[in-house]
Image (spheres, rainbow, N blue to C red):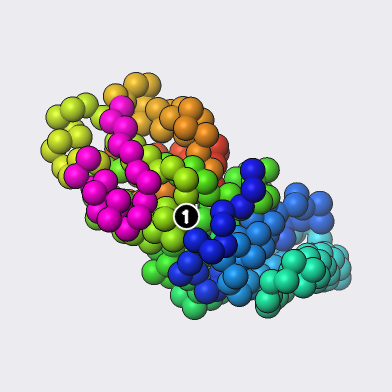
């Protein structure tokens, strides 16, 4: 599917993409391709942090390696990270996108902290989600989301090209959901169809701000929006995942909770479930 019309996708001026090289045989980053095509669609500046994880002698599993072996591994990972950055810069130049690349070699905690700090300087951060050896993908998403004050798009494998024609807004009436929808307005306005999805019993749906009451706000911003209230079914996550497939969603917008016991059942668990596997890129805000 083609990308959203650049003339309608406004309000994004700079985009950050973060990747972390953990091994010599790294899978291609979907976030890089997604971020590059999004930056082109929005006529935005692209920054790519292609980091390599510097191995630490404090790691127990490194006991079998001598210092020279660790240094060799560090240099190989650094070379790979730099290669990814250079390749991305070349692709960006060919696409006519202004791009800045960084290839820091740091211990894993510093990679995550540096990314969160850099995210504060950009409108949006784009990261991969997928199975990784040290689960650094989800750690980067969480850190960027909760410590940058900026939204994050978490991109699952296989979504290498930006598209946002059809968007689902996961709505539970909370402040987090409202913040996510508001931060996603550039995408919602450019979309052909937006569906507000609320999942739960009728009593649960009407105990908070119903999606039908939120829809006029989006419509006033020029969003082509509909509302769909659904029963929970097997679980909130499975119901939302199924609806995303039926709607053919290119993006799912949801608010993110952090260790909130009162919301863990309804939405905190949904966010974690989708970070383990999503049918479409997730637009997350806190």
Q: Secondary structure at mark 1?
A: helix
Q: Residue at x 25, y 53 (%)?
A: 217
Crowding at dot 1, Cα within 10 Å, few <14 / some 14-19 / many 20+, comes out as many
x and y percent of residue 245 in the render? 51, 30
Name the quadrant of the N terminus: top right
Find residue 31 and report its image quarter.
Answer: bottom right
Left or right placement of residue 47 versus residue 74 in this view: left
Q: Residue at x 35, y 55 (%)?
A: 222
Left or right placement of residue 139 versus residue 264 in this view: right
Query: Residue under circle 1?
Result: 190
In this rendering, does residue 72 appear at all? yes
In the rendered image of this protein, does residue 101 appear above or below residue 127?
below
Viewer-closest of 198 and 118: 198
Left or right placement of residue 209 versus residue 23 in this view: left
Q: Residue at x 46, y 38 (%)?
A: 273
Find residue 180 and report its image quarter.
Answer: bottom left
Name the quadrant of the C terminus: bottom left
Left or right placement of residue 264 versus residue 137 in this view: left
In the rendered image of this protein, does residue 90 appear above or below residue 181?
below
x and y percent of residue 131 in the render? 63, 44
In this rendering, does residue 261 appear at all? no
Q: Residue at x 52, y 74 (%)?
A: 13
x and y percent of residue 105 in the render? 71, 73
Specify the segment rendered in magenta. Answer: 212-230
Q: How many marks?
A: 1
x and y percent of residue 231 in the render? 29, 24
Residue 235 drawn in magenta: no
């Amino acid at each position: 599917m083609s990308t959203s019309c650049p003339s309608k996708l406004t309000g994004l001026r700079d985009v950050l993409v973060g990747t972390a090289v953990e091994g010599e045989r790294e899978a291609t980053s979907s976030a890089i391709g997604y971020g590059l095509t999004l930056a082109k669609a929005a006529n935005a500046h692209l920054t790519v942090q292609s980091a390599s994880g510097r191995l630490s002698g404090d790691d127990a599993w490194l006991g079998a390696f001598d210092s020279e072996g660790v240094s060799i591994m560090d240099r190989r990972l650094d070379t790979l990270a730099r290669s990814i950055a250079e390749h991305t810069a070349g692709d960006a130049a060919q696409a006519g996108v202004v791009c800045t690349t960084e290839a820091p070699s740091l211990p894993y905690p510093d990679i995550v902290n540096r990314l969160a700090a850099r995210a504060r300087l950009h409108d949006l951060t784009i990261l991969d989600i997928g199975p990784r050896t040290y689960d650094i993908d989800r750690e980067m998403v969480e850190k960027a989301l909760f410590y940058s004050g900026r939204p994050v798009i978490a991109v699952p494998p296989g979504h290498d090209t930006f598209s946002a024609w059809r968007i689902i807004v996961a709505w539970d009436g909370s402040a987090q959901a409202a913040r996510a929808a508001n931060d996603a307005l550039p995408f919602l306005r450019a979309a052909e169809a937006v569906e507000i999805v609320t999942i739960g019993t009728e009593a649960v749906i009407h105990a908070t701000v119903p999606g039908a009451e939120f829809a006029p706000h989006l419509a006033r911003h020029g969003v082509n929006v509909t509302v769909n209230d659904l029963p929970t079914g097997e679980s909130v996550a499975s119901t939302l995942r199924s609806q995303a497939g039926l709607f053919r969603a290119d993006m799912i917008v949801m608010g993110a909770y952090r260790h909130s016991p009162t919301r863990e059942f309804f939405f905190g668990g949904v966010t974690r479930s989708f970070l383990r596997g999503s049918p479409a890129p997730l637009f997350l805000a806190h």
